[in-house]
Amino acid sequence: MNKKIALELNEMAHIVAKRFSRNNREQNFNNENFEVHEIIPMSDHTACVYYKKNTDKIGAAFFYYIPNGMSKGWKYFFPTDSHLNGMTAFHYYKLEVERGNYSKNLKTSEV
């Protein structure tokens, strides 16, 4: 992860902490406050951010970076077990796509 992207991740992680700490936030039944506990880079464009709550619980958010276009920047969500199971299955299909596309790279274009 380059320095610029890392600094943007740090800034976004703290913005998210403020957003989720709002007392009037929907689903904030326990009036929890969030504080960035740890940022764990997982690749150049993904990270796990641990949030420590004032209830002593930890929340884990998945951050992913979009490098260009109108959606450029860090996005996030708090994945459920269902999300994680789905992404585990998605890995298989992504590998199949790469498998099928590889041979197309070997074809020469006719001029």
Image (tube, rainbow, N blue to C red):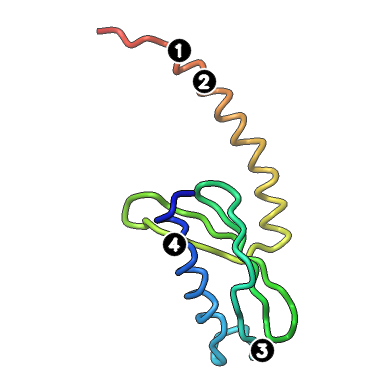
The residue labelled by disc 4 is: 7
Residue 63 quadrant: bottom right
Q: Residue at x 57, y 85 (%)?
A: 21
Give the quadrant of the C terminus: top left
Mark 1 near mark 2, Cβ–Cβ under 8 Å? Answer: yes
> Which residue is more in the foreground, 34 or 81?
34
The residue where tag 3 is placed is 29
Dot placed on the residue nearer the N-terminal end, 1 or 4: 4
Res 73 quadrant in image: bottom left
The residue at which mark 2 appears reads as 102
Amino acid type, callout 1:
Leu
Label for residue 106? 1
Identify whether 80 is placed above or below 86: below
User: Is 1 situated left or right of 53 in this image?
Assistant: left
Q: Position of residue 91 (x, y in %)?
A: 65, 40
Frontmost residue, 30 versus 33: 33
Amino acid type assigned to the residue bearing label 2 in the image: Tyr
In the image, farthest residue toward the front: 3
Label 4 – label 2 distance at C-alpha: 35 Å
Asked if the residue at tag 4 contacts the one at tag 3, i.e. Cβ–Cβ closer than 8 Å, the answer is no
Q: Specify which label sits upstream in the sequence, 3 or 2.
A: 3
Q: Secondary structure at mark 3?
A: loop
Which residue is painted at 65% across and 87% down in the image?
32
Foreground disc of the pair 1, 4: 4
Element marked by disc 2:
helix
Q: CA distance from mark 1 to mark 2?
A: 7 Å
